[in-house]
Amino acid sequence: MKSLVRLFFRSLRTVLGPVMLLKEALTRPKGVVRTRAEQAEVDAACRGLALYQFKTCPFCIKVRQEMRRLSLDIAKVDAQHPGPARTELGQSGGQTKVPCLKITDASGSSRWIYDSEKIIAYLRSRFAPA
C-alpha cells in the first residue's frame, strides 16, 4: 500500500511539476532596485547563504519568488535526489526537509532554517529595503 501511495504522488508530481514551473516563470516578480554599492553589499552577504530545495516544491517556489523580489543571489542546492547535498541536509541540518536555508557565518559555523515562512521572514528582516 505504501508503494502505491508513493507511486501516486510521484505521478502527480510528474504531471503537475511542469505546470508549477511554468507558473513560476510567468509570475516572476520584479526585483528591488538598489545602487551598485548596495547590491554589491547584499551580494556579499548572500555568499554565506544556500537554499536547499526541490525544483517543483511549492514551498521552495514561494521562497525563490521572494528571493527574486528582494534581488538576492543565493546559491540553490538541489536536494531532491540522493547524493552529497541531500546527505549534508540530513546530517548537518538535522532533517531531510525542504526548503531549508543554510546560513554560514564568517567563522564558518552554520545554522539551518526550515519552513518557507521562517525563511522568508529571515530574508525580509535582513535584506528588505528600509
Image (spheres, rainbow, N blue to C red):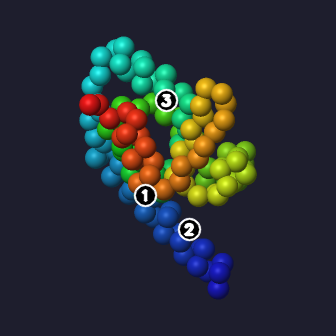
Please provide percent x and percent y for residue 43.
45, 24
Q: Nearer the viewer, residue 29 or 70?
A: 70
Give amino acid for label 2: Arg
Q: In the rendered structure, are the residues bearing label 3 and label 1 in contact, judged by CB atoms less than 8 Å apart?
A: no
User: Residue 30: x, y in percent?
Assistant: 26, 35
Say which quarter of the image contains residue 16: bottom left
Instruction: Write the residue at 67% across / 30% down.
Output: 108
User: Please, is residue 40 above or below residue 14 in the view?
Assistant: above
Q: Amino acid at mark 1?
A: Pro
Q: Residue at x 64, y 85 (%)?
A: 1
Measure the C-alpha gap from mark 3 to mark 1: 22 Å
Report the Cα–Cα distance between label 2 and label 1.
Answer: 15 Å
Foreground tag (2 vs 1): 1
- State the residue lying farthest toward the bottom: 1
Q: Does 113 appear above or below 123?
A: below
Q: Earlier in the sequence, mark 2 or mark 1?
A: 2
The local secondary structure at tag 1 comes to helix
Bin the neighbour count of mark 3 within 10 Å (Cα to Cα): few under 14, some 14-19, many 20 and up: some
Q: Which residue is mark 2?
A: 10
Residue 125 locus on image (x, y percent): 37, 39
Instruction: Report how many numbered discs are placed on residues in the image.
Output: 3
The residue to which callout 1 is attached is 58
- The tag earlier along the polypeptide, 2 or 3, is 2
**Image height of 21 relative to 38, above or below:** below
Examine the rendered structure and indicate whether residue 112 appears above or below residue 38. below
Q: Are marks 2 and 3 in contact (CB under 8 Å)?
A: no
Could you say which is closer to the camera, residue 77 or residue 124?
Answer: 124
Residue position marked by numbered label 3 in the rendering: 46
